Image (cartoon, helix red, strand yellow):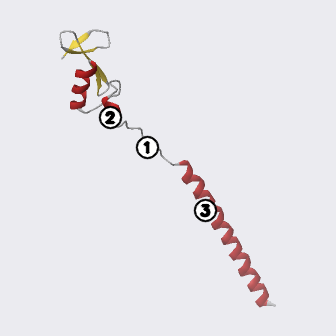
Amino acid sequence: MTNILLILFLLIVFFVLLFLLFVDSKRNNKSAKKTTISPTYIPYLKEQEFNPDISTDNWDLHKLRLDKFKRSQYKGLTFFVSSENKIYYLSEEGDKVYC
């Protein structure tokens, strides 16, 4: 009689542990899905070359776009080429600041 109770007790403990592992694995899967991070969009060099409105940190590309389009965005600031071939940008007040 005691052997049957012992076996029954061990089976109950086994199933409770199995259930807890199953619930924990489901919780980990849900939290992993929430934390996926998508990579930021970085335009290809060719796309940057043909679009002067995309900001770049590449000085050579910036100079190339100034020659080609007479404007280019460099480190978040748009530069222009005047009719006298001088490079300038517009200040916050709207004044031309020549480089």
Image quarter for residue 48? top left
Q: Which mark is residue 60?
A: none
Which residue lies at the image location 79% right of the left edge and 87% below the top edge? Answer: 4
Residue drawn at point x = 29 percent, y = 28 percent: 75
Q: Residues within 10 Å of mark 2 (few under 14, many from 20)?
A: few
First in sequence, mark 1 or 3: give its number.
3
Foreground of the two, 58 or 84: 84
Label located before the other in sequence (1 or 2): 1
Q: Secondary structure at mark 3?
A: helix
Q: Position of residue 54 (x, y in %)?
A: 35, 28
Numbered mark located on residue 46 in the image = 2
Please name the amino acid that badge 2 sits on: Lys
Residues at circles 2 and 3 in contact by the CB criterion of under 8 Å:
no
The residue where tag 1 is placed is: 39
Q: Is residue 45 above or below residue 4?
A: above
What element does badge 1 sit on? loop
In the image, taking residue 5 as reference, residue 79 lies left or right, namely: left
Q: Amino acid at mark 3?
A: Ser
Foreground of the two, 51 or 19:
51
* Placement of 95 over or under 14, stated as above or below: above
Q: Secondary structure at mark 2?
A: helix
Residues at marks 1 and 2, CA–CA distance in whole angstroms: 20 Å
- Which badge, 2 or 3, comes first in the chain's sequence? 3
Which of the numbered marks, if any, corresponds to residue 25?
A: 3
Q: Is residue 81 left or right of residue 12?
A: left
Q: Amino acid at mark 1?
A: Pro
